[in-house]
Image (cartoon, coloured by chain):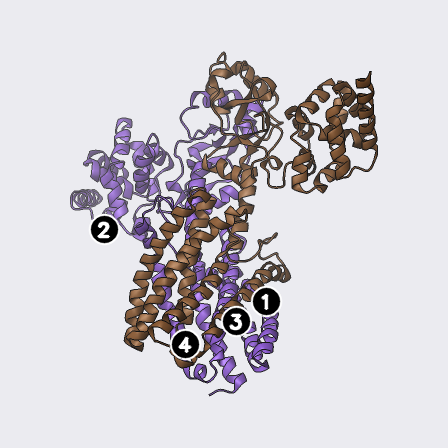
Chain colours: A brown, B purple
């Protein structure tokens, strides 16, 4: 009896929470109350509320709750709920939240609901609707195709081919066929080729081979690189419980990689990627894509002016020192960029991981030392012959130290960037050049001061 | 009678030319004589000479001659000739010539001979044997798979499916099926998907759609980019007469593009691509991949020293001028690299062509002017406030001019590189930086001399 009232009141409070304005606190309350309201009550509320309210309530439920509710709904209304979930308002409510809140409030939808929700939508509708699934912007779940033709392991090859023939026009690919078991759990894949090669009475269970799949929440670039490095033609996408929710095809992957590459390449020279082709972009767009970074770099280059100001009197004493400034800073920048580019690429293709930081530093230290030894020796001889051995010594030692410093910093930066969650290409080559310029000048004048006994 | 003697003597001279050492002149003679020897004689010679001799003779024949000879050979010997052509010595003879001679002496083989020559070879044998086909190193013909499952337009869908089922294990892909007519001329393609969807009695001729194909001699990167931009799953490869000689699959394309990208990225920072992963390369290898370019750059940077030497007395008079050297050269380098990277990328993906040179220059001129205007104004104000308006004016004007110069040069370089047949990435960013450093310094001191009235 008391239970009864408690339940009722909980249900009532839930109902009123739904009727009010749907903001973050309201959603917290809804999530909180939903746990106290028994299943039949929840089902009734989802069934009887307004489209928007029922969609929001259903979306906020935990995965298992949602699944139970969905299965208890009258079949006719299930379709209706799917429609409600597709309403733009729902998408906007979900999108409206910042990613963390979204992740906290909206778990994954039950796989079968997600599939029904996504199927039969064109690209545009899909992009809008995927938001409802709560996948973050960069999640591969947003790029996969939900129309996937899957087989059951207890079918014969002949039966499977029948299904393929019957549904040939629907899915994005029929060349790789995911095999699912109870509850759409992914068991593996069968290539259409193997299916055709098989005898009619062979069981799918005997043809299935282990598949390389990815989770819907995986970052889009990570998933794509995995796809390409394994030379796949398609990759099943699963949810946290390994239930098949979609399939990733080469088209999707190439689109993603093209975007990511264009971005990295643009960044590597300190400009923003263009959203249109070079010749069709307006001059203003081009300027816009470059000016910000150029300003930032110029401002940080003021550092070099200040460094030189410190040593102005030394310059006054030995003006020759000024002659080598571009040579030394240039060499530092080049050495740093070589290291940075190599490591950035190695990070992108997964040859190097964050935990390799130590190894990378140790490698670049030695590489820098060897490069510096060669250049330093050369600098010592050439400068020595022309400007006297004292200057030669200064130039030689500076080149040696600058190369060591630049190679190490260049190798270090991309990994640090990745470590702090930034795009390694952001600490782009121009930044490293500027940094190496300033540091190199300090090294230069410190050495000069000591060797030439300036004060 | 006289003819007879002429023919005989020609045949005899050809025979003796074959028995001698096979060097360039010998091959010229063989090619020359082959035209005068009638078909039956040629066939006899190919049939009766030693394996190496017959292979060389056959390979030097024109395509139509070769085809006629091949068809007149006893079937048993045809297979033998194919074997002879696979002999490493033949490959070495062909490889031994420089590309122009090779192109001049060895045309394409008849499509059916080429196919038989290549089929059933593992990757390694294939790489060796493709040399015999005379494809240059970078030709897509070296990367295609010669095992291709093709259909005839007069087959029914059912018959076609039978062929697919029967030969399912052979070819590299069965998902795209080239359709060939008389003499293996490519008519189009049918996707396995459409074949499955078709009714049993449909004719292949009704299912065929136009195919995007490439020529065996096409550059590997060009063909691969085309493959990717059209989002193909496979691409038929044809010879000059449009006869099907092989098929290009996604694996081949991805291998090629990975290599090309790694190369471009490495070059863009002035280092050579590594043939192994970063962490598994020896320190020495890393140094080797960087030292050459670093030396070249350092040596060309000596230019900046010489430029400054010219203006040494000005520096002596106004030592403040030295403070801005890294800032100005740095900004020039950055502006140049932004332009170079954008244009290089645009060239790679085909957004910009060599003939667009004028448009690119005009665009970069304006972009550089706008960037320079912003930076120049900033420089004028900041430097003016700190070091007085005369210096401010020098810095402002220099930044303006340097940005215009750098953007234009940066946009220009990659196109010129491509124009002279070099890899645009070779005129890599470091080079542009170094060039802009020297030019920028000249601009700087010219302006300074005028504005400050130095002498």
Disc 4: which residue:
B307
Q: Residue at x 49, y 45 (%)?
A: B225
**Element carrying mark 3:** helix
Q: Is residue B261 visible?
A: no
Position of B325 relative to B30 (above/below): below
For residue B169, what is the image quadrant?
top left
10 Å crowding of disc 3: few (<14), some (14-19), many (20+): many
Q: Chain of mark 3?
A: B
Residue B24 circle label: 2
Dot 1 or dot 2, earlier in sequence? 2
Question: Share a chain, discs 3 and 2?
Answer: yes
Which numbered disc, 2 or 4, marks the residue closer to the eye?
Answer: 4
Cα separation, mark 1 vs mark 2, equals 58 Å
Q: Nearer the viewer, mark 3 or mark 2?
A: 3
- Rounded to the nearest angstrom, the CA distance separating label 3 from label 2 is 54 Å
Residue bearing mark 3: B402
Q: Secondary structure at mark 4?
A: helix
Q: Position of residue A55 (x, y in %)?
A: 76, 30
Instruction: State the separation of the CA atoms marked 2 and 4.
Output: 51 Å
Marks 3 and 1, how far apart in space? 10 Å
The image position of residue B98, as x and y in percent, is 29, 52
Instruction: Determine if marks 3 and 1 fall on one subunit.
Output: yes
Q: Earlier in the sequence, mark 1 or mark 4?
A: 4
Tags 3 and 1 touching, CB below 8 Å: no
Q: Please, what secondary structure does the residue beneath circle 1 have?
A: helix
Please tell me if label 1 and label 2 are on a single chain: yes
Q: Residue furthest top?
A: A201
Q: Of A122 and B23, which appears nearest the observer?
A: A122
Residue located beneath label 1 in the image? B371
Give the quarter of the figure containing the N terminus of chain B: top left
User: Could you tell me if the residues under marks 4 and 3 are in contact, i.e. CB atoms within 8 Å?
Assistant: no
Q: Is residue A274 left or right of residue B62?
A: right
């Amino acid at each position: 009896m008391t239970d009864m009232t408690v339940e009722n009141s909980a249900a009532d409070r839930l109902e009123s929470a739904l009727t009010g304005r749907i903001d973050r606190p309201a959603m917290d309350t809804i999530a909180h109350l939903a746990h106290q309201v028994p299943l039949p009550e929840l089902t009734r509320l989802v069934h009887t509320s307004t489209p928007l309210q029922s969609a929001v309530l259903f979306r906020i439920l935990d995965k298992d709750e949602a699944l139970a509710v969905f299965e208890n709904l009258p079949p006719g209304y299930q379709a209706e709920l799917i429609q409600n979930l597709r309403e733009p308002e729902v998408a906007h409510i979900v999108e409206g939240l910042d990613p963390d809140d979204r992740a906290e409030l909206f778990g994954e939808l039950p796989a079968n609901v997600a599939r029904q929700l996504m199927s039969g939508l064109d690209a545009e509708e899909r992009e809008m609707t995927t938001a409802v699934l709560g996948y973050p912007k960069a999640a591969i779940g947003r790029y996969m195709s939900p129309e996937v033709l899957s087989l059951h392991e207890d079918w014969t090859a002949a039966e499977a081919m029948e299904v393929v023939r019957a549904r040939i026009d629907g899915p994005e690919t029929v060349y790789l066929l995911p095999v699912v078991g109870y509850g759409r759990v992914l068991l593996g894949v069968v290539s259409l080729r193997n299916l055709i090669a098989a005898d009619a009475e062979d069981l799918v269970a005997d043809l299935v081979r282990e598949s390389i799949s990815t989770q819907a929440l995986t970052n889009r670039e990570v998933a794509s690189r995995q796809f390409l490095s394994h030379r796949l033609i398609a990759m099943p996408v699963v949810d946290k419980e390994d239930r098949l929710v979609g399939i990733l095809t080469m088209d999707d992957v190439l689109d993603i990689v093209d975007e990511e590459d264009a971005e990295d390449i643009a960044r590597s020279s300190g400009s923003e990627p263009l959203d249109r082709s070079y010749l069709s972009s307006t001059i203003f767009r081009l300027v816009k894509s470059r000016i910000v970074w150029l300003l930032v770099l110029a401002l940080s280059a003021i550092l070099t002016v200040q460094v030189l100001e410190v040593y102005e009197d030394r310059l006054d004493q030995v003006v020759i020192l000024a002659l080598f400034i571009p040579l030394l800073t240039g060499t530092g920048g080049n050495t740093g960029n070589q290291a940075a580019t190599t490591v950035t690429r190695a990070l992108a293709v997964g040859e190097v991981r964050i935990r390799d930081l130590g190894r990378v530093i140790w490698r670049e230290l030695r590489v820098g030392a060897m490069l510096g030894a060669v250049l330093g020796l050369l600098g010592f001889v050439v400068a020595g012959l022309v400007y006297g051995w004292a200057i030669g010594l200064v130039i030689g030692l500076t080149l040696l130290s600058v190369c060591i410093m630049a190679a190490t910093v260049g190798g270090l930066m991309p990994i640090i960037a990745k470590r702090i969650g930034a795009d390694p290409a952001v600490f782009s080559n121009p930044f490293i050049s500027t940094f190496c310029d300033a540091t190199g000048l300090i090294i230069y004048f410190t050495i000069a001061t000591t060797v030439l006994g300036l004060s």
